[in-house]
Amino acid sequence: MADEAVSVLVVDDQVPFRMAAKTVVRVTPGFEVIGEAESGEDAVAQVDALQPRLVLMDINMPGINGIEASRRIHEAHPDVCVVLLSTYPRDDLPADALTSGAAAYINKDEFGPQILRNTWDGTGADGEAPRSAQI
């Protein structure tokens, strides 16, 4: 699997950020966007259908928020790495983010190719379940 690109699902209710996140993924060597979702409900269904290795998940969305969607994805697909994205300072993350099964958190203002690569390398680069919670 080392030569295979990391398949990524981008989840955000805001079209501009989904477009920006997809661009970051596309310009990061070794990653490919295989789908996108605009809600937590859609994210859960897309993971079932597409089986991505990595999900970039916004926290604040109407309906099922990203934390609950992460929990559901982690329970059904423990091998899928979920990384939460939002504008929260790390110290202000909702408490349930820590127990959602997400492997890491990235502030949207800091999200870019090097952060994506570094986060993946620390969470699931070997195709296994995340080794440590970085939230």
Image (cartoon, rainbow, N blue to C red):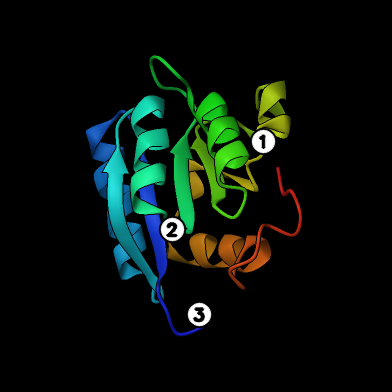
Residue drawn where x is 39% and y is 63% of the image: 7
Of labels 2 and 1, earlier in sequence is 1
Of labels 3 and 2, earlier in sequence is 3
- Which residue bears the numbered disc 2? 112
Q: What's the amino acid at mark 1?
A: Arg
- Residue 105 in percent (x, y) is at 60, 43
Q: What's the amino acid at mark 3?
A: Met
Within the image, what quadrant is residue 11 found in? top left
Q: Is the residue under label 1 in contact with that under label 2 (CB below 8 Å)?
A: no
- Which residue bears the numbered disc 1? 90
Seen from the viewer's position, the closer of residues 50 and 89 is: 50
* 3D distance between C-alphas at marks 2 and 1: 17 Å
Determine whether the residue tagged by mark 3 lies in a helix, strand or loop.
Answer: loop
- Residue 17 in percent (x, y) is at 31, 40
Within the image, what quadrant is residue 52 found in? bottom left
Q: What's the amino acid at mark 2?
A: Gly
Label 2: how many Cα within 10 Å (few below 14, some 14–19, many 20+): some
* 3D distance between C-alphas at marks 1 and 3: 32 Å
Of labels 1 and 3, earlier in sequence is 3
Residue 54 as seen in the image, left or right of residue 23: right
In this rendering, is residue 27 above or below 52?
below
